[in-house]
Image: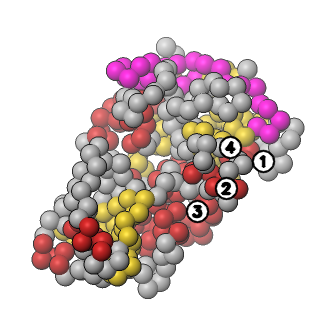
Amino acid sequence: MIPASSYAAPDARAPLGPYHFQRRDPRPSDVVIQILWCGVCHSDIHQVRDEWGRGEFPMVPGHEIVGRVIDAGHDVKKFSPGQLVGVGCMVDSCRECPSCREGLEQFCEKGFTGTYASKDRQDGTPTQGGYSSVIVVDEAFVLRIPDNLEPAAVAPLLCAGITTYSPLRHWKIGPGSKVGVVGLGGLGHMALKLAHAFGAQVVQFTTSPSKKDDAMRLGADIVVMSNDKAAMKEHASTFDFILDTVSAPHDLNAYLQLLKRDGTMTLLGLPDTPPTVHGGALLFGRRQLAGSLIGGIAETQEMLDFCADHGIVSDIEVIAIQDINQAYERMLRSDVKYRFVIDMASLSKDTR
């Protein structure tokens, strides 16, 4: 067994704190990774507070992992010690269902194995995530990190990056497309960067005039105040695609009216209450309301290579692991631009 230091939630009501546990010995196809950086996703908060239910504690969160290979099983062919690698939201899937065979492991019909808050498919033990010193992952779910990108700023690409890249690629966004982005946070700022790199005309929707300059810096061509009815009406029936990154309850119908005939609005957020959609907003124009969830392993590698070609990384604030509970509170206040990343070297400073 491999000893691991980490920060974990002991239960859904307690703050995260130091926790020591054992990682499995590497199986023949496993890669052992020393974790250097781990992004902080809003879903980490939902999970450690058991807001989605069925949480198992102690829980070590974190699924935006960048680290260095320190060992590998004898059947590993793609990775060797010293390589910089990444691990995203999944560490396994059934690998047999139609979705898995098509490289869409995120839609595994038996359910993918999450990097944390899930169960190992072979021994049934709880998976534990990246707020830790080391992780052991099958090489099929390990990603190559391009050499020309800043490793810390790459970490959020493994969730926020692929979550926004996948729908843009699936709906064939490119030059000539008019794309709207709803929400300017961890997901929204990546959507702006990627849609701009795809060659689309990009419009940021916001209710805050103070966000205009940042949106333009990140890739927006136009910024529209979504609470300005006249400004919204100017863009009616002009969008090919709208990417909605907001998890708070909000009116979808106002955005659906902006789509062209056969346009698509794709949801990435998970509001607490189901949205109300007026049928007419879809029927008149044959518009589509869709959803999307991260991406498969091959597509995630494609995304990383695309980001390397275009010099795209996340805007980050680096923190020590000891500051994670304060970071959670700041995230709930939207007080971060735009993603926290933990310097996992800070674990060594915790002597408790």
Q: Residues within 10 Å of mark 3 (few under 14, many from 20)?
A: many
- Boundaries of the magenta span: 5-30
Dot 3 or dot 1, earlier in sequence? 1
**Cα–Cα gap, marks 4 and 3:** 23 Å
Residue 252 x %, y %:
26, 62
Q: Badge 4 is on which residue? A: 94
283 or 122: nearer the viewer: 283
Q: Is residue 311 visible?
A: no
**Cα–Cα gap, marks 3 and 1:** 19 Å
Q: Residues within 10 Å of mark 4 (few under 14, many from 20)?
A: some
List the single residue furthest toward the right.
Answer: 74
Dot 4 or dot 3, earlier in sequence? 4
Q: Residues within 10 Å of mark 1 (few under 14, many from 20)?
A: some
- For residue 321, above or below residue 266: above
Q: Is residue 172 left or right of residue 81?
A: left
Q: Badge 2 is on which residue? A: 98
> Answer yes or no: do the residues labelled 4 and 3 have beta carbons within 8 Å?
no
Amino acid at circle 1? Phe
Residue at 31% x, 63% y: name it: 182
325 or 298: nearer the viewer: 298
Amino acid at circle 3? Met
Q: Is residue 63 visible?
A: yes
Q: Badge 1 is on which residue? A: 79
The nearer-to-camera label among 4 and 1 is 4
**Cα–Cα gap, marks 3 and 2:** 22 Å
Amino acid at circle 2? Pro
The nearer-to-camera label among 4 and 2 is 2
Dot 4 or dot 1, earlier in sequence? 1
Dot 1 or dot 2, earlier in sequence? 1
User: Mark 3 falls on what kind of element?
Assistant: helix
- For residue 159, above or below residue 278: above
- For residue 241, above or below residue 346: below
